[in-house]
Image (cartoon, grey):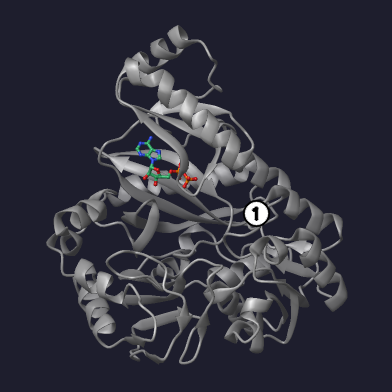
Amino acid sequence: MSAPLRRLLIANRGEIACRIQRAARTLGIETVQIHSASDAGARFVTEADDALCIGPGAPRQSYLSADRILAAAQLTGADAIHPGYGFLSENADFADRVEAAGLTFVGPTGDVIRRMGDKIAAKHAMEEAGVPCVPGYDGPLIDDPAALVAVAERIGFPVLIKAAAGGGGRGMRVARSAEELPQALSTTREEARLAFGDATVYLEKFLGTPRHVEIQVLADTHGQAVWLGDRDCSLQRRHQKVIEEAPAPGIDRAAIATLGEACAEACRRIGYRGAGTFEFLYQDGAFFFIEMNTRIQVEHPVTEAVTGLDLVQAQLRIAAGEPLWFDQSGVTVSGHAIECRINAEDPDSFLPSPGRIADWQLPEHPWLRIDSHCGPGAVIPTEYDSLIGKLIVHAPDRESAVARMRRALEGTRIEGIRSTLALHEWLLSDPGVQAGGIDIHHLERLLEERT
Ligand code: ADP
């Protein structure tokens, strides 16, 4: 486990595959890129040191096939696997299998992933570590209507019924009164059983107008953990983040520091290793833990911009057994960063727009970072998520970061497919977005007003 990584297999695709390759190259680690037949000509395939097609476009037969990925690792002599985000990145059984095969999994242990993937267990672990959680009933719910109503009344309506195994914004339902409770319970149960193979649900207070604020952490295999500031990801559509920024505007820095310390402490207690994110809802000056993501996140570059740290390189160094090379006093946040996620989607209908990129022009600025696997001629397949690139700007303060992002968007041209570029330009002209501190329903409200 504590040997330098030599040859890294990347079990992912798209922009994050390019991002991981870049970090590996800097550290002198060879890259093996697995891919599906649909991605054969993609840049992340041609730029890797070694590449192997492991199956057809369907994710189940390629990026989600643990069998094929492990066979590919063996065949290519890889000694470690980076799962990226999505796909198998939070699959505890996959992490176990990687390690059982004698390879290094770039992420926490299967046991930790399993524990954090069960939202009830995760909440218990956080409460024990002193991380503030959404008030609720943390036991799995029983089918006793009277007991259920009593619990909900104690917490106060509206309440949210959530699947313990839920993810991707699915498996959740609001109940606004005792009458709505039984129906909400049975529907969520059924949905959870079908979607996650686990009907366990729990109940928590439904917050009406929260912001989404998260804490980035980094922990090594020697019991050390630090937190790397916060991010605000409140601009969401259907629970999918659209724009993220660091730090979260208008929140007391001392409160963030207390929260960050609690997160670092939670990492030490649960034996966390690698990069991770604690997600919170923030309302009326208080934070409420909702879940932990045990992987690198799409929005990690805003944290890199304000801290000057390279999170993917850090993941690889930690996976190789290196002790953290700085402590909390070595983490400083400077300026403000914003990220816009550009999707291959119609900016009005949000329908996917796969196809061939005919023209692709991006501006160059010292304050602009572009994370993308696309370019002129790139083909966006139909089978995968529609993220084609991320624009990340860094500036001394938030106002200039917004201005710089608007300039970067203006200078960007993507032709041949539809993209959400225009949506971002529109959002950054909104007074609420410009002022900062909007809640998680802001974008959906704007879209409703527009129609
Ligand atoms: P998932 O794993 O599906 O992403 P989360 O627990 O992170 O589930 O919740 C997803 C989203 O659902 C949150 O970002 C927030 O918008 C909403 N949400 C979750 N819990 C609550 C709550 N208690 N009150 C209000 N909204 C919530």
Q: Residue at x 49, y 71 (%)?
A: 309
> Relative to 113, does residue 295 appear above or below in the rendering?
below
Between 284 and 170, the one lying in front of the other is 170
Q: Residue at x 48, y 31 (%)?
A: 188
State the image coordinates of residue 254 (x, y, percent, origin top left): 32, 48
Between 427 and 326, the one lying in front of the other is 427
> Relative to 43, does residue 313 appear above or below in the rendering?
above
Check disc 1 and report its element: helix, strand or loop: loop
Tell me which amino acid carries mark 1.
Answer: Arg
For the C terminus, give its image quadrant.
Answer: bottom left
> Relative to 260, does residue 208 appear above or below in the rendering?
above
Q: Residue at x 36, y 31 (%)?
A: 174
For the N terminus, give its image quadrant.
Answer: bottom right
**Ligand 1 location (quadrant):** top left
Residue wearing tag 1: 273
Q: In which quadrant of the rendered view does residue 397 lie?
A: bottom left
Q: Residue at x 70, y 55 (%)?
A: 221
Classed neighbour count for the residue bearing mark 1: other residues with Cα under 10 Å, few (<14), some (14–19), many (≥20): many
Between 390 and 232, the one lying in front of the other is 390
State the image coordinates of residue 379 (x, y, percent, origin top left): 52, 83
- Residue 164 makes an appearance in the image: no
Between 406 and 420, the one lying in front of the other is 420
State the image coordinates of residue 43 (x, y, percent, origin top left): 58, 86
Q: In which quadrant of the rendered view does residue 312 lie?
A: bottom right
State the image coordinates of residue 95 (x, y, percent, origin top left): 73, 54
| Residue farthest to the top, as pictured | 146
Left or right: residue 131 compared with residue 342: right
Q: How many marks?
A: 1
